[in-house]
């Protein structure tokens, strides 16, 4: 079972047609395999947070079985553009 | 990753023993049903999440969270002055721990339920806290967030 940040990044990018994906391996800060991800995708438009997070969870369903802790941030391209301006 | 959200998250994730103290009357901590080997069927969980307005599943207890994310949930509820909520410690009950994940189709703990409905985990609660949605959702449940009173005090100065 491949569980590298790079692998997760590519999978998220592909499945969610993401404009931007960041995956941080936070395992050193936690007790077991842990990741923090940022996904920017037009697929999140018009979707409430819970639905967005479920899209990510579905994409990584197999991997999440082996991940202990998972943080995610999901933005639309517009939200991402605004954040970068801050 | 953007600055402010991760800084706020980092602040909430910092946790130490006794973080839940301060002399406040603690939240209503309930333990998941007395039934053994069956205390986590879908029907039972359904009843559990609907029994109280605010229900959280944590690793640890509000007084002693055993995980940074669970602690973040406890701290956010504390900030809003929500004291009467049901908190279930999944570390006490492996069947509950798996059962609640199956029930909500959500892979991680903590889990937050408002008015019987699954709201999300720590990330979502944190974002709702930051964008004002949590105050609104609590209002719908007839719970007045303590942050509203804080703001009122600030405005009147």
Image: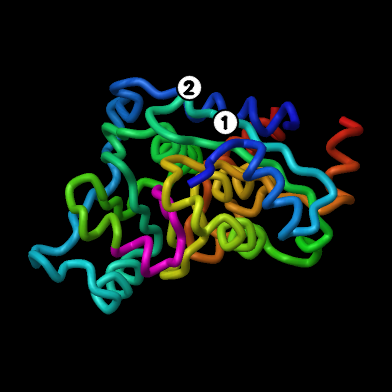
Magenta-drawn stretch contains B105: yes
Q: Is residue B16 above or below residue B48?
A: above
Residue appearing at x 41%, y 41% in the figure: A68
Judge from the rendering whether residue B65 lies leftward or rightward of residue A75; answer left or right.
Answer: left
Give the secondary structure at mark 1: strand
Do the numbered discs 1 and 2 sit on residues whose CB atoms are within 8 Å? yes
Residue appearing at x 9%, y 63% in the figure: B34
Q: Are there few (<14), some (14-19), or many (20+) residues within 10 Å of tag 2?
A: few
The part of the image, by quadrant, that contains residue A48 is bottom right
The N terminus of chain B, quarter of image = top right
The residue beneath circle 1 is: A25
Magenta-drawn stretch contains A55: no
Mark 1 and mark 2 on one chain? yes
Judge from the rendering whether residue B39 lies leftward or rightward of residue B117; answer left or right.
Answer: left
The part of the image, by quadrant, that contains residue B116 is bottom left
Mark 2 falls within which chain?
A
Q: What segment carries the magenta color?
A: B99-111
Residue appearing at x 85%, y 49% in the figure: A19
| Observer-nearest of B99 and B69 | B99
The C terminus of chain B, quarter of image = top right
Q: Residue furthest front?
A: A1
Judge from the rendering whether residue B155 lies leftward or rightward of residue B22; answer left or right.
Answer: right
How many numbered marks appear? 2
Residue appearing at x 45%, y 44% in the figure: A67
The residue beneath circle 2 is: A28
Measure how far apart labels 1 and 2 are at the Cα level: 8 Å
What colouring style does the render use? rainbow
């Amino acid at each position: 079972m491949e569980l590298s940040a790079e692998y997760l990044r590519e999978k998220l990018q592909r499945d969610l047609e993401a404009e931007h994906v960041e995956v941080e391996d936070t395992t050193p800060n936690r007790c077991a395999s842990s990741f923090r991800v940022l996904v920017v995708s037009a697929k999140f438009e018009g979707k409430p947070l819970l639905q967005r997070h479920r899209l990510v969870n579905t994409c990584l369903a197999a991997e999440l079985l082996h991940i202990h802790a998972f943080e995610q941030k999901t933005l639309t391209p517009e939200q991402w553009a605004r954040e970068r301006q801050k | 990753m953007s600055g402010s959200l991760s800084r706020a998250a980092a602040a909430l994730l910092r946790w130490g023993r006794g973080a839940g103290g301060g002399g406040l009357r603690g939240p209503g901590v309930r333990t998941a049903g007395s039934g053994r080997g069956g205390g986590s069927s879908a029907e039972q969980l359904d009843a559990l999440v609907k029994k109280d307005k605010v229900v959280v599943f944590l690793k640890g207890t509000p007084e002693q969270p055993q995980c940074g994310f669970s602690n973040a949930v406890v701290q956010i509820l504390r900030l809003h002055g929500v004291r009467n909520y049901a908190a279930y410690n999944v570390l006490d009950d492996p069947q509950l721990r798996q059962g609640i994940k199956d029930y909500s189709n959500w892979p991680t703990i903590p889990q937050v339920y408002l008015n019987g409905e699954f709201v999300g985990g720590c990330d979502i609660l944190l974002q709702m806290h930051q964008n004002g949605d949590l105050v609104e959702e609590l209002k719908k449940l007839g719970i007045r967030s303590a942050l509203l009173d804080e703001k009122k005090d600030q405005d009147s100065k």
